[in-house]
């Protein structure tokens, strides 16, 4: 379920971005083809939203891939205990990113990302170990 929620979080960020973009087009503030992937030229919030969404999309193949490997190989006992902490760290990182780019916010955001990296490395090590020595994992 955490993989599904991760995907839903990335989708919600995308929907929010496209809702705001649609409002900008409908109000005549931006032409329909006037957007860039990073929302350059738009508000700082829109630029942060684009990055927060991109961060999710960029990390989904790595972390989602580890979750998928665990699901397919029936090794979810490895990933399940930390899956919701991972997801909470991912959502928290995005929310901090949306709120601010102050030096303190960047440090907090990086801490949330570091938690995700630590969990990912742990999962990768444990999954790999379970394939090499199935009884040891």
Image: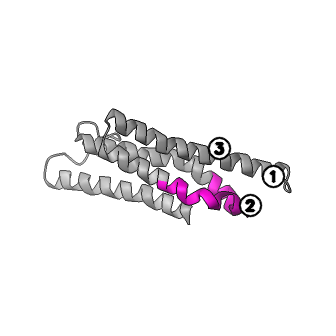
**The magenta stretch spans which residues?**
66-88
Q: Is residue 121 left or right of residue 129?
A: left
Which residue reaches farthest bottom? 1
Q: Where's residue 65, x and y in %?
A: 62, 52
Magenta span includes 57: no
Labels 3, 1: front one: 3
Q: Quadrant of residue 121?
A: top right
Checking the image for residue 131, the label placed there is: 1
Can residue 42 be seen in this snapshot? yes
N-term-proximal mark, 3 vs 1: 3
Where the C terminus falls, by quadrant?
bottom right
The image quadrant where one finds the N terminus is bottom right
Residue nearest the viewer, comparing 79 with 33 = 79
Q: Earlier along the polypeptide chain: callout 3 or callout 2?
A: 2
Q: Is residue 87 above or below residue 96?
A: below
Residue lying farthest to the left in this orientation: 28
The residue at the point 34 percent across, 39 percent down is: 38
Place residue 33 in its image quadrant: top left
CB-based contact (under 8 Å), mark 1 and mark 2: yes
Label 2 belongs to which residue?
73
Question: Which mark is on residue 104?
Answer: none
Answer whether residue 77 is magenta in the image.
Answer: yes
* Residue 35 appears in the picture as rendered: no
Q: Which residue is pictured at 36% across the width and 36% down the height? A: 104
Say which element carries label 2. Answer: loop
Residue 134 point in image, percent of width and height: 84, 55
Question: Residue placed at 57% from the left, 43% from the top?
Answer: 117
Q: Secondary structure at mark 1?
A: helix
Tell me the distance, in whole angstroms, between the alpha carbons under discs 3 and 2: 18 Å
Numbered circles on residues, count: 3
| Cα distance between the residues tagged 3 and 1 | 15 Å
> Which residue does the numbered mark 3 point to in the structure image?
121
């Amino acid at each position: 379920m955490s993989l599904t929620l991760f995907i839903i979080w990335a989708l919600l960020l995308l929907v929010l971005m496209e809702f705001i973009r649609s409002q900008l087009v409908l109000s005549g503030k931006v032409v329909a083809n006037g957007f860039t992937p990073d929302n350059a030229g738009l508000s700082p919030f829109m630029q942060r939203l684009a990055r927060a969404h991109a961060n999710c999309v960029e990390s989904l193949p790595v972390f989602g891939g580890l979750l998928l490997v665990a699901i397919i190989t029936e090794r979810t006992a490895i990933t399940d205990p930390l899956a919701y902490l991972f997801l909470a760290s991912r959502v928290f990182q995005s929310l901090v990113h949306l709120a601010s780019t102050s030096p303190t916010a960047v440090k907090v955001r990086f801490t949330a990302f570091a938690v995700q990296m630590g969990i990912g490395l742990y999962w990768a090590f444990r999954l790999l170990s379970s394939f090499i020595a199935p009884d040891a994992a």
